[in-house]
Amino acid sequence: MDYSELKSLLTKNNVSVNEAASLLGYKEENSFKPSFVSGKMYFSRVPLLCKLAGISPNELFGWEVEGVSGSGNYASHISGGNTQNSNEAIIALKEELKEKGGIIKEKDKQINRLLGIIEKGKKQ
C-alpha cells in the first residue's frame, strides 16, 4: 500500500494523519511519512496503524494467501485467541513467497516476528 492510499483510508475513518502519527508515537506527519514510505516503521506499530485505517496487516502489506481459510484477516487472528489459524496462515504465506522467487529479507523478518508474537501469546 502506498502512502496516499493509507492517508485516504485514515481520512475515511475520521482520523487525521497528524492524529495517527501522534498515536503511533511520532511528533507529526513529517516524521511518520518517511518511516512508513521507507518501510522502517517499528513493527509493533502496525496493529494500531491498521486499526486506525480500518484494514488488516495483509491489506497494508499486500499479502494474499490462497487456500488458507480466513488468511485475509491477520489482525483478528493475532489480536484474538485463534493462534493455530494464525500460525498456519503465516506459514502458508512464507511458503507462497518462497515459491514466487524467494523470500524478501524484510518480509521474512516480519513473518518471523508475527510467529514470535503468536508463540508468546500461546505461553500466556
Image (tube, grey):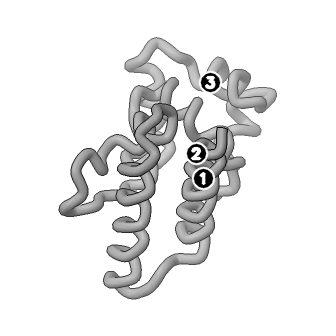
Cα–Cα gap, marks 2 and 3? 30 Å
Q: Are marks 1 and 2 in contact (CB under 8 Å)?
A: yes
From what the image shows, is residue 39 above or below residue 103?
A: above
Q: Secondary structure at mark 1?
A: helix
The residue positioned farthest toward the front in the image shown: 123
The location of residue 18, given as percent across then percent down, is 66, 22
Relative to the observer, which residue lies in front, 83 or 29?
83
Cα–Cα gap, marks 1 and 3? 29 Å
* Residue receiving disc 3: 20
Disc number at residue 122? 2
Snapshot quadrant of residue 94: bottom left
52 lies left or right of 109: left
Counting residues from the start of the chain, the first of labels 2 and 3 encountered is 3
Residue 32 visible in the snapshot:
yes
* Residue receiving disc 1: 119
> Which residue occupies 46% across, 46% down?
83
From what the image shows, is residue 66 above or below residue 3?
A: below
Disc 2 marks which amino acid? Answer: Lys
The residue positioned farthest toward the top in the image shown: 14
The location of residue 43, given as percent across then percent down, is 65, 49
